[in-house]
Image (cartoon, rainbow, N blue to C red):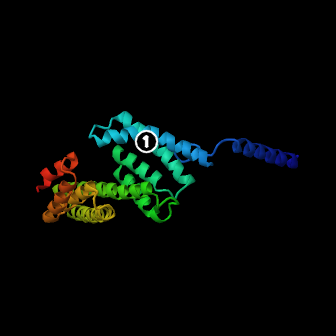
Amino acid sequence: MKNWVIAGVVVTGLFAVLFLSDRPAQTPSGLSIIRTSSQYVEANNKAAALALGIFQKAETGAVITDEDKAKLREAVKYFEAMQIYEPRHIASYFGAGKCLMLIGEKEKAGEKFAQAILNRGTDPDRDAPSVQMTLIESMGLLSEVTLDLAAEELGNANSAEQANDAKGATDAKKRAGIYYEQSLKYATAAVQAAPTGYRYLVDRANVYQAMGRKAEAKADIAKALALAPNDPKVQMAAKLIGR
């Protein structure tokens, strides 16, 4: 009788394995695992359909709505599914990072941009101009994200000081200093990679200004104005920093 019970359990187990094997494996976000290049292209198209219009909207300075953020979160799922299938590509990390940045999840966005930069030597298409541009843009956006994180840490330091938490204030200021150095590092890398990229000059000028290095900030703004005198972002930075 015992042998029959064991046999029944084994058969039941095999049935369960066969049944489950017909189900598509899933990513942590719940999407089906990408198994073919055509599925990869399909995921990229879905992510683009969700996110590109919102990216363009953000460029105009328009408000990103809750509906937009829901679409961006969905796009992140597709980008991350792509990363599981092909972890070497820069573009999927950049896309996810930009979505997360617009959602307001800055630390996660920074991690994605940092991975895109790390992939500069592994992306099979790394020499393609479009991939090189995406790499440089990842540097610029990572600079912006880390500058925002530095500002948040300074806010934390002020709150700690008001609460008479000297250690908390000191630790927050140290973290802010680290973020400032990282922001400057990536902004400078973007400027060096694209010397005529006036937006990267603005990014670095903003970092210099936040760090109290006003002369260097003004020098970068002067270069940006010479390259793009009518660009709204350049004009705004010029007003804030001074020429």
Instruction: Quadrant for residue 145, please give it.
Output: bottom left
Comparing 109 with 1, the one in front is: 109
Residue 163 in view here? no
Query: How many numbered marks, from 0 up?
Result: 1
Question: Which quadrant: the C terminus?
Answer: bottom left
Comparing 45 with 150, the one in front is: 45
Q: Residue at x 50, y 39 (%)?
A: 46
Few, some or many C-alpha atoms within 10 Å of disc 1 (few <14, some 14-19, many ≥20)? Answer: some
SS category of the residue bearing label 1: helix
Q: Residue at x 70, y 42 (%)?
A: 22
Q: State the image coordinates of residue 239 (x, y, percent, origin top left).
A: 12, 50
Which residue is under mark 1?
Answer: 73
Q: State the image coordinates of residue 175 (x, y, percent, origin top left).
A: 28, 63
Instruction: Quadrant for residue 194, please give it.
Output: bottom left
Answer left or right for 235 relative to 90: left
Q: Residue at x 86, y 48 (%)?
A: 2
Amino acid type of disc 1? Arg
Q: State the image coordinates of residue 69 (x, y, percent, origin top left).
A: 38, 39
